[in-house]
Image (cartoon, rainbow, N blue to C red):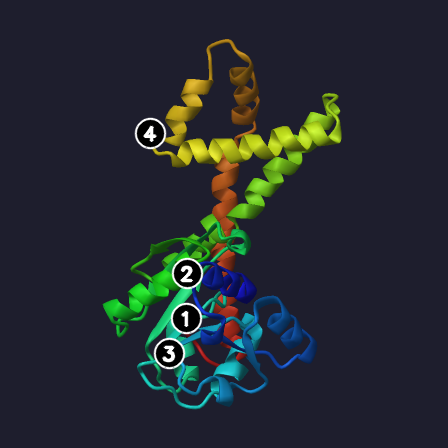
Amino acid sequence: MASALIGGLLAHGQAATDIGVVEINPEAAKRLRSTWGITTHQEAASALEGVGTLVLAVKPQHMAAMAKALPPLSQDVRVISIAAGIQTTLLSRWLKGHANIVRAMPNTPALIQHGAAGLYAMPQVTQEDRLHAQSLMRAVGSVVWVTREADLDAVTAVSGSGPAYVFLLMEAMLKAARALGLDEDAAKTLVLDTVQGAAMLAKAGHDTPAELRRKVTSPGGTTEAALAVLNGARLEETISLAMHAAAARSRELGNGLARETGESN
């Protein structure tokens, strides 16, 4: 995700000389330099000199040790965390009381600058700094703000895990297309372009997804026959159960990380 952000920022005109990355793995650091032309550091102390925005993109299980090892930050430094499950109050504690923190929940389509991220800001974050975080995350896709940090669990269930739901649907459609006699290339083209086209049509905003579904479903037609099977299998209820499970697991992971560090959110 850090590489996605770097690529998005550069594509939106950010100078490579303005971006620095702390990467202790020499091979990974070499790849970052050769791919993006940015500066890499082995230690955080050298990277933090004069920094305005600090993006924390380590794995959640490594966040406590990394954050606690950082020197005290000026409150002018904007901290953006993209680590899943770690609440801002806990991160602030690890950062010695630093409270200029925005927490972001991006998703994997950010890799091609078509992501969707949910953002939450601590109360101490100014409007100017909120807009800065929003601009940074928009380099890799769309952004929505939530007013309650707990709502990031719902964001995780919708957009964080959401691509996997769509991939599963595509996978099933591909298998069925081949079973119906289409060759691999034809099946792939039809399925991928159908999913992309349907999303683009829905995003055009003229009709709701429900209205679009009704318009394509002629009485007694092929689509109605297919939807009868899906409704009979209680697809809508299954999707709701799946998303509630994802949100619940997001909460569990966050609470588990807090317990593992001997702290509570």
Residue 204 percent coordinates (x, y): 38, 34
Instruction: Tell me the kind of residue under disc 3.
Output: Gly
Q: Nearer the viewer, mark 1 or mark 3?
A: 3
Helix, strand or loop for disc 4: loop
Residue labelled with disc 2 = 137
Q: State the residue at coordinates (49%, 68%).
A: 83
Please tell me which residue is depicted at 72% across the width and 21% down the height of the picture. 180
Neighbour tally class for label 4: few under 14, some 14-19, many 20 plus, Cα within 10 Å: few
User: Which residue was labeled with disc 1?
Assistant: 80
Q: Secondary structure at mark 3?
A: loop
The tag on residue 52 is 3
Give the secondary structure at mark 1.
Answer: strand
Q: At numbered mark 2, what does the secondary structure look like: helix, strand or loop? A: helix
- Would you say the residues marked 2 and 1 are in contact, meaning their CB atoms lie under 8 Å apart? yes
Front in this rendered view, residue 47 or 148:
47
Relative vertical location of residue 221 with respect to residue 233 in this rendering, above or below: above
Q: Which mark is residue 206?
A: 4
Q: Residue at x 31, y 81 (%)?
A: 76
Sequence-wise first label, 1 or 3: 3
Would residue 101 appear left or right of 184 to someone viewing this image? left
Density class for disc 1 (Cα within 10 Å; few <14, some 14-19, many ≥20) is many
Q: Amino acid at mark 1?
A: Ile
Q: Real-space Cα distance between discs 4 and 1?
A: 35 Å
Query: Disc 2, disc 3: CB below 8 Å?
Result: no
| Image position of 77 with respect to 172: above or below | below
Q: CA distance from mark 2 to mark 1?
A: 10 Å
Across and down, in percent, residue 187 comes to 68, 29
